[in-house]
Image (cartoon, rainbow, N blue to C red):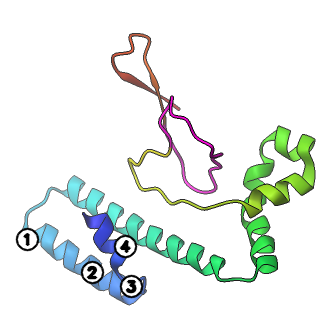
Amino acid sequence: SISSIVMSFNVDDGEFHARMRTLQNFLRHAAVPASLHHKVRCYFAHTHEQARRIHDCDAIDTLSHSIRTELKYHLYSRAVQRFPLIGEVLGEDFIREIVNAVHESVYGPEDFVFVAGSLTSEMYFLVRGRVQLFLPSCSQDSPTQRP
């Protein structure tokens, strides 16, 4: 898939732009419709950004425990504090514990973060981007999209 190919590339911008030009030439040569051409380019760029984020996450893991803890607090505490139970009731020490346990995950367009009804021991905080929630309709035959 394009996703796995891009993830294996070096995240160097020069290489990315060269590969983007090659992809655009291919799409033009294949007479891909403009709307699909745009989707492919956007997905390619998104996947490149994902590779960068994964590289950043790997770099964080190489830091000393104290620096990694401080950095994770800076990166994730605002997302955690948005929940009154955590921010106001459980307090600052609990927030530090939560953010220290954070494992960042990167999802692409149309990826499922969590499937309703599944059991998990995870807690999810959205730090960047947006998600769509799909709930079963009353008839249980088809999912209904809700904002």
Give coordinates of residue 11: x percent, y percent.
42, 82
Q: From the image, which quarter does the N terminus lie in?
A: bottom left
In whole angstroms, how far apart are the C-alphas of marks 1 and 4? 25 Å
Residues under labels 3 and 1: Cα distance?
26 Å
| Badge 4: residue crowd in 10 Å (few <14, some 14–19, many ≥20) | some
The disc, 4 or 2, on the residue closer to the chain's N-terminal end is 4
Q: Earlier in the sequence, mark 3 or mark 2?
A: 3
Residue type indicated by callout 3? Asn
What segment is highlighted magenta in the picture? 114-132
Identify the residue under disc 3.
Answer: 10
Task: Say which quarter of the image contains residue 6.
Answer: bottom left
How packed is label 1: few (under 14 Cα within 10 Å), some, or many (20 or more)?
A: few
From this view, report whether residue 100 is shown above or below residue 89.
below
Asked whether residue 104 is drawn in magenta, I would say no
Q: Nearer the viewer, residue 20 or 77?
A: 77
Mark 3–mark 4 Cα distance, whole angstroms, equals: 8 Å
> For mark 2, what is the residue?
19
Sequence-wise, the earlier of marks 1 and 2 is 2
Q: What is the x, y in percent for residue 94?
A: 86, 52
Secondary structure at badge 3 equals loop
Kindly identify which residue carries mark 4.
7
